[in-house]
Image: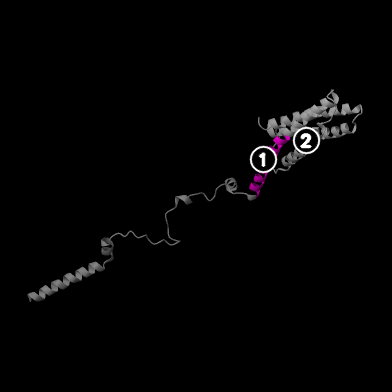
Amino acid sequence: MNRLAAVLVILSLLSTTTARAQSPSSASKDAPKSDAPTKAPREDSPVAEDPSLDFDLLEPAETAAAAQVDPELQARIDRRRTMLKLHQGLGIAMAAGIATTTVLGQLQFNDSFRGGGDDRNLLGLHRGFAIGTSALFASVGLLGLLAPEPFEKEKTEWDTISYHKLFMALATAGMVAQIILGVMATDRYGKLSETDMATAHQVVGFATLGAVTAGVVTLFF
């Protein structure tokens, strides 16, 4: 009888132990924490918000338009920047060419009409510089005129560019007048009117040099 009671007690203890081992609450309490990554939640399950995604989807239209890149506008800006850089570099070379042409013309004027011997040894050099400078002047002007305007100006106001354009417009008129007067002076070689044409050519030349100089200076001051 004692043996039977002992067997029953052992079976009872085994049954209790097995029931505890199969209990979910017991397993969850006793199971060690795992370092393995948890399974990714489903798309419809709630997840923690990512700070990097914290933005207002209903932002103002002006802000959205400013943030959006316009390839066509950017291309026009780049093309204008390139053309104006060439305009500036060639413009300085053109101004130096006009100054050299004016000096050569004055030296030739002194030789021809102020008792310098009238050997005309500088006339060819002066003419060559005049032709080259005129070509540079035209190229510089076209680069400035054809450079695209990416942004429209709201109102007309006098600024540095306005004064630059004014002086260069005067210089353009002077260049055209110089060419005409120079050709007329050459055609009147040996005549009394040659001196008048050469003097007018000289005066217009200095005025053109002054206008070009003022146009260049306005860009730096």
Q: In this image, 15 relative to 59: left or right?
A: left
As helix, strand or loop, the secondary structure at mark 2 comes to helix
According to the picture, the residue beneath numbered tag 2 turns out to be 129
- Answer with mark 2 or mark 1, whichever residue precedes in sequence: 1
Q: Nearer the viewer, residue 130 or 117?
A: 117
Question: Horizontal and vertical percent for residue 34?
Answer: 31, 60
As helix, strand or loop, the secondary structure at mark 1 comes to helix
The magenta stretch spans residue 60: no
Q: Nearer the viewer, residue 148 or 173?
A: 173
Q: How many marks?
A: 2
Question: Horizontal and vertical percent for residue 91?
Answer: 71, 36
Residue for point 7% across, 74% down: 2
Between marks 2 and 1 in the image, the one whose residue lies nearer the viewer: 2
Give the class, few, some or many, for how many residues have Cα within 10 Å of label 2's Cα (few <14, many ≥20).
Answer: many
Question: Horizontal and vertical percent for residue 39?
Answer: 39, 62
The disc label shown at residue 85, or none = 1
Q: Is residue 207 visible?
A: no
